[in-house]
Amino acid sequence: MDRLIYTAMTGASQTLGQQAAVAHNLANAASTGYRAEEHRLRAVQVIPGANPGNPSAAPTLPTRAFVVDASTHADFTPGPLQMTARPLDVAVQGPGWLALTLPDGSEAYTRNGSLELNVNGVLQTRNGIPVQGDGGSITVPPDVKISIANDGTVSVVPESGAQNTVNAIGRIKLVNPPEADLVRGGDGLFRLRNGAPADADPKVVVAGGYLEGSNVNPVEQMVNMISLGRQFEMQMKMLTTADANDRAATQLLSNF
């Protein structure tokens, strides 16, 4: 019964966390470039030992086990490409990421290629984060037509004058670090665990005029939500059963 109570109690707590992750995935089923979030649980045995705060207390029983969130995993499966024909839209084809420059000077990585220009002509995300180029941010001059090549090169053609003159003004930094080294931040952007910038990868290919959709499968997430709901109900029922068994055992002993 002791093992039942602790396992069911911690299992129910972590199941609520899993339900929150599934709800977050469903909320971002239509978000551009979103990567589904997964939580993996495991049972951890409590190591017996004395209580440091109360040396006279009895040692922890070895029957107790906790359920803990072992890791938060991101599903890096590519999402579907959607054609927009918008010059500032770009989608990464296959593995790879677009590099961004955060206000503190560090780098972050995203698959959301819905870009725009600020009032100063700096290429940035919809959230106002500049895109990292070969030599810093990429600034686009006014009155030009923009195109983004497969290797991330940003080119412009004047809308007046010599309209057949193509000028390359910068190249978007494209990276492809190992997936195991990436961690999702609270802002939804990915970073390297060690905080260092990733090296540019010339093998990463992008498609201009396209956006990558979310890789969340709404049907699968709904099934997971139902399954987690039933799992939570079962764990709460186990707690109720353990409490009933404890009451029955106490009443039985009190009769002697």
Image (cartoon, rainbow, N blue to C red):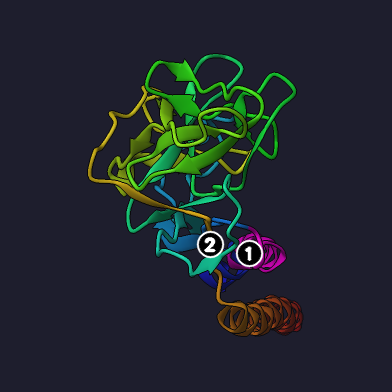
Could you tell me residue 59's position as x and y percent? 47, 44
Question: In the drawing, does residue 7 fall left or right of residue 92?
Answer: right
Could you tell me residue 107's position as x and y percent? 47, 25
Query: What residue would you read off at disc 2?
Result: 36
Question: In the drawing, does residue 27 fall left or right of residue 224?
Answer: right
Q: Are marks 2 and 1 in contact (CB under 8 Å)?
A: yes
As drawn, 238 above or below 134: below
SS for tag 1?
A: helix
Q: Nearer the viewer, residue 96 or 249?
A: 96
Q: Nearer the viewer, residue 225 or 80?
A: 80
| Quarter holding residue 45 | bottom left
Q: Locate the C terminus and report the quarter of the image it occupies.
A: bottom right
What amino acid is labelled 1 in the image? Asn
The answer, for residue 24, to whether it is visible in the render is yes
As for residue 19 lying within the magenta part, the answer is: yes
Highlighted range, magenta: 11-31
Could you tell me residue 167's position as x and y percent? 42, 27
